[in-house]
Amino acid sequence: MRILAVSDREEPILHEYFERERWGQIDLIISCGDLPPDYLEFLESSFNVPLFYVRGNHDLTYDEERPGGCDNLDGKVVKFAGLRFLGLQGSFFYGGRDLQYTEGQMRRKIWGSLPSVWLAGGIDVVVTHAPPRYCEDDECSRPHGYGLACARHDERTCADASDIPHRGFRSLRGLMLKHKPRYLLHGHTHLNYRLGTRRREVASTEVIDCYGHVILEIDK
């Protein structure tokens, strides 16, 4: 299955300069958030395939204008073409808006989704806006920033963002370690926050930053 994943930035080649033939087969579109509803509607209608989305921390307009024809994944598991998708919206709490969550609140969101995960027999793809925390040290509360010296271990470099708005959730890391999805797709970090790296691994899960757009091919 060939998936087009988008997040955070309206790509000219997917909008005003869109040419359907250049994209080949696309079976599903996934939005990881912070994109206007009309952009998602354009993609859904132009490719004529299902579009699943989660909301980013800036997607407050969705309260009045939801993207028509698209399926909100937040807090539930949706099956498509033999794969099970779980969505979790929002970013780390940094100012009190509706789509920002503390670590405890995100943990409770994950707990609330577990009945759907159990009924589905597991999950293959987790779709989020925020990234997970990468560092294994649960005692580290102040990451120095990607690639910088670790605050607690001389032999390590830091694996996480130093600024709170772009910091990932430990609970997402725990979700991957326990339920072992094949992929976690997220947005929010705009690549430059993680030194341009799109793909990282947490145990058996491949984590992909979908800023702009990414094409993902998954064997069923």
Image: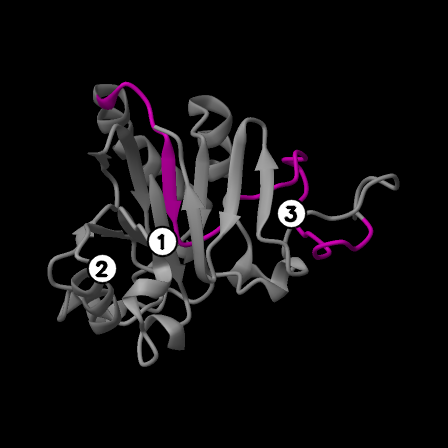
How far across and how far down the image is residue 60, in percent? Answer: 26, 69
Task: Name the amino acid type tagged 3.
Answer: Ser
Q: Main secondary structure of the magenta part?
A: loop
Q: Secondary structure at mark 2?
A: helix
- Decide if residue 171 is on the left or right side of residue 117: right
How far across and how far down the image is residue 137, in percent? Answer: 68, 35
User: Disc 1 or disc 3, which is closer to the eye?
Assistant: 1
Q: Which residue is mark 1?
A: 4
Q: Which residue: 36% across, 59% down?
A: 23
How far across and how far down the image is residue 73, in percent? Answer: 24, 46
Decide: few, some or many residues near mark 1? Use Cα within 10 Å; few <14, some 14-19, many ≥20: many
Do the residues under discs 1 and 2 have CB atoms within 8 angstroms?
yes
Q: Is residue 99 above or below residue 104?
A: below
- Quarter-wise, where is residue 67 in the image? bottom left
Decide: few, some or many residues near mark 3? Use Cα within 10 Å; few <14, some 14-19, many ≥20: few
Viewer-proximal residue among 169 and 103: 169
The answer to whether residue 142 is magenta is yes
User: Disc 3 or disc 2, which is closer to the eye?
Assistant: 2
Do the residues under discs 1 and 3 have CB atoms within 8 angstroms?
no
Q: Which residue is mark 3?
A: 141
User: Quick one: quadrant of the C terminus?
Assistant: top left
User: Disc 1 or disc 2, which is closer to the eye?
Assistant: 2
Q: Is residue 180 above or below residue 1?
A: above
Task: Name the amino acid type tagged 1.
Answer: Leu
Task: Write the start and end of the magenta stretch as one range.
Answer: 120-149
Which mark, residue 118? none
Marks 1/2: CA distance?
Answer: 10 Å
Q: Which residue is mark 2?
A: 47
